[in-house]
Amino acid sequence: MAKSYFITGTDTSVGKTCVAAALLHLAAKEGLSTAAVKPIAAGCEQTGQGLRNDDALILQRECTLSLEYQQINPVALEPAIAPHLAAEQAGKRLSNTRLAGYCRGVMMSGADFVVIEGAGGWRVPINPVEKLSGLVKELNLPVIMVVGIRLGCINHALLTAEAIAHDGLTLAGWVANCCEDDMPCYQENINTLKQLLPAPCLGEVPRLTAPTPSLVANYLNISNLSQ
């Protein structure tokens, strides 16, 4: 069975895709076959091949397995808004059971290392009664949390970690991703998180103008990922 991890963030736009793609890059460098899923993507653009999402395309390029776009991003939504609202506008009904089926298909594709990237933060709703965190519970996956290092990050990270533990899941590791230039007490914030979060720090990614997967991978270490 593949080593599979769910990638969540302390908020939207904290670098989940950058980190997920970098993890795929690292795993491939270690000789592992890789695959990825971004079950829901809002903010997709119409192309000649249908709706496409930039983040999902980044993940697709880093997979060593040849996967169709629809396998990586089974639910593509055009409006760049919360997934449940985008689905509502598109006349679609999202459910964790269906999303889990899509994910299991890729998890059983034969890859050694699989990442499943969430949308937004941990408690993002997908319909009036379900949240995307329920998908992770259904798949029983360990979680990698991307912490956007900016004002308020300690509170957001601790609340997310508490929610993951409350759901009976394992926080396997976390990544510090700098989201602001010249953040006051930058290192002090990271040191506090290292003291308080119940999981290893997999790396500190500085503010980068062009955060390619290969570049971000230089700042990460997956050797101490816990299952």
Image (cartoon, rainbow, N blue to C red):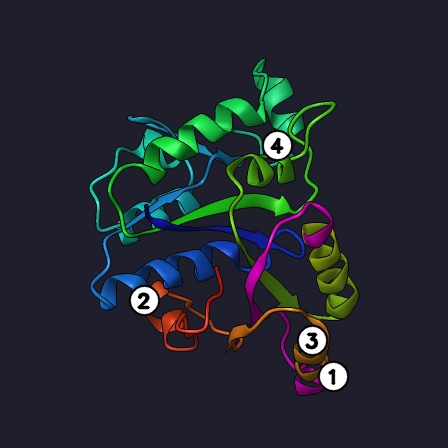
Inspect the magenta stretch and tell me whether residue 176 lies in it.
Answer: yes
Callouts 2 and 4 close, C-beta under 8 Å? no
Would residue 156 appear left or right of 202 to someone viewing this image?
right
In whole angstroms, how far apart are the C-alphas of marks 1 and 2?
31 Å
Looking at numbered disc 2 in the image, what kind of residue is underneath it?
A: Leu
Which residues lie in the magenta part? Answer: 165-188
Looking at numbered disc 3 in the image, what kind of residue is underneath it?
A: Leu
The residue indicated by pointer 2 is 26
The residue indicated by pointer 3 is 193
Would residue 9 appear left or right of 161 to someone viewing this image?
left
Residue at 32%, 45% (x, y): give it.
1
Callouts 4 and 1 close, C-beta under 8 Å? no
The residue indicated by pointer 1 is 184
Q: Is residue 76 visible?
A: no
* Residue 131 image offset from top left, x and y in percent: 67, 34
Residue at 59%, 23% (x, y): give it.
87
In whole angstroms, how far apart are the C-alphas of marks 2 and 4?
29 Å
* Residue 44 image offset from top left, x and y in percent: 47, 34
Looking at numbered disc 4 in the image, what kind of residue is underneath it?
A: Pro
- Residue 60 position by quadrant: top left
Q: Is residue 81 above or below residue 179?
A: above
Residue at 63%, 77% (x, y): give it.
181
